[in-house]
Image (cartoon, rainbow, N blue to C red):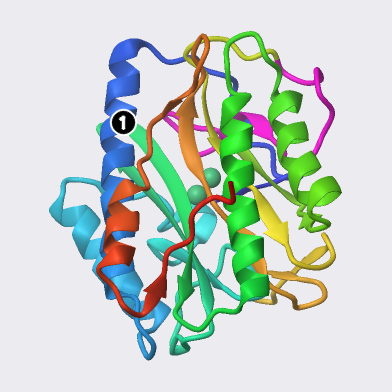
Amino acid sequence: MGLLSNEHSGKRIFHKTAAEIELMRKANLLVSKTLAHVGSLLKPGVTGEILDKEAERFILDHGGRPAFKGYHGFPATLCVSYNDIVVHGIPGKRAFKETDIVSVDCGVEMEGFYGDAAYTFAFSKVGVEELDLLRTTYASLYLGIEQAVHGNRIGDISFAIQDYCERQHKYGVVRDLVGHGVGRSLHEEPEVPNYGRRGKGYLMTEGLVIAIEPMVNMGVKEVYQDSDGWTIHTKDRKASAHYEHSVVVKKGKADILSDHSFLLDAIKNNADLQEVLPKS
Ligand code: MG
Ligand code: MG
């Protein structure tokens, strides 16, 4: 789940101990396996509501608590955001189509710590233009993660994502929602925007845990919120992509707590989905 950039979490910055990081790894492992479970269930005709029920049961069966359900009144376990929905889609009764792209965002609380990750799935008949948006956005996530090292600033992450998606690929990077610190709360400081200037912003040091989550539009960067108070759409109703990992800032190389390998395996075994890998 992204943070509205005007929302301010109100939670200050907490660096995590090694033991706390291992607890966060456990929460993120359950997030990762839940996303894989969802990936195994995705097929045309399935609804967001069905995925949500399955995800909730899966999380509870594995000793976690769905982190989004009840968060500021959000009514569901997953955010399910298809096509022109950027993020925060409420799982509903619309049946998926074989041309859909579907962002699934999942948060879990376990033993007092939160995990948070997301992936945009592509059904079998998604076209090359949408696939390019997805692969570009996914690549930008890893470019951002490369910058999440001790001694760098948040702006180094922001710049890497924006430069790749906007300057190099002419997509629109969403400004109204940002990544965030994560830990004992789903949203902590600092904010992690997907746009910004190199060398600016909070100085990152070892033990900072952040959720990096580029939200990138095929067309304009502007978005609007639906009358349901949650769903964020692109203003021009063109497609939008969203990928997210929770990562620990370390010396030399970030430690990625969430693990997309489970869902990538699920996609391989699901003929209704196409694999989306970061553009190389
Ligand atoms: Mg999330
Ligand atoms: Mg998030």
State whether residue 231 appears in this view: no
Q: Is residue 65 above or below residue 205?
A: below
Residue drawn at (26%, 62%), measured in percent from left and top? 37
Inspect the magenta stretch and tell me whether residue 138 lies in it.
Answer: no
Q: Position of residue 243 (x, y in %)?
A: 54, 51
Q: Quadrant of residue 230?
A: bottom right
Q: Position of residue 79 (x, y in %)?
A: 48, 63
Amino acid, disc 1: Arg
Q: Nearer the viewer, residue 6 or 221?
A: 221
Residue drawn at (81%, 72%), measured in percent from left and top? 235
Residue drawn at (57%, 31%), measured in percent from left and top? 145
Q: Is residue 94 above or below residue 274?
A: below
Q: Which residue is mark 1?
A: 25
Magenta residues, dominant SS class: loop
Q: Nearer the viewer, residue 65 or 164?
A: 164
For the magenta stretch, what is the residue range? 180-202
Q: Is the residue marked 1 within 8 Å of ligand 1, measured from its CB?
A: no
Q: Position of residue 161 (x, y in %)?
A: 71, 40
State whether residue 59 appears in this view: yes
| Residue 232 relative to residue 250: left or right | right
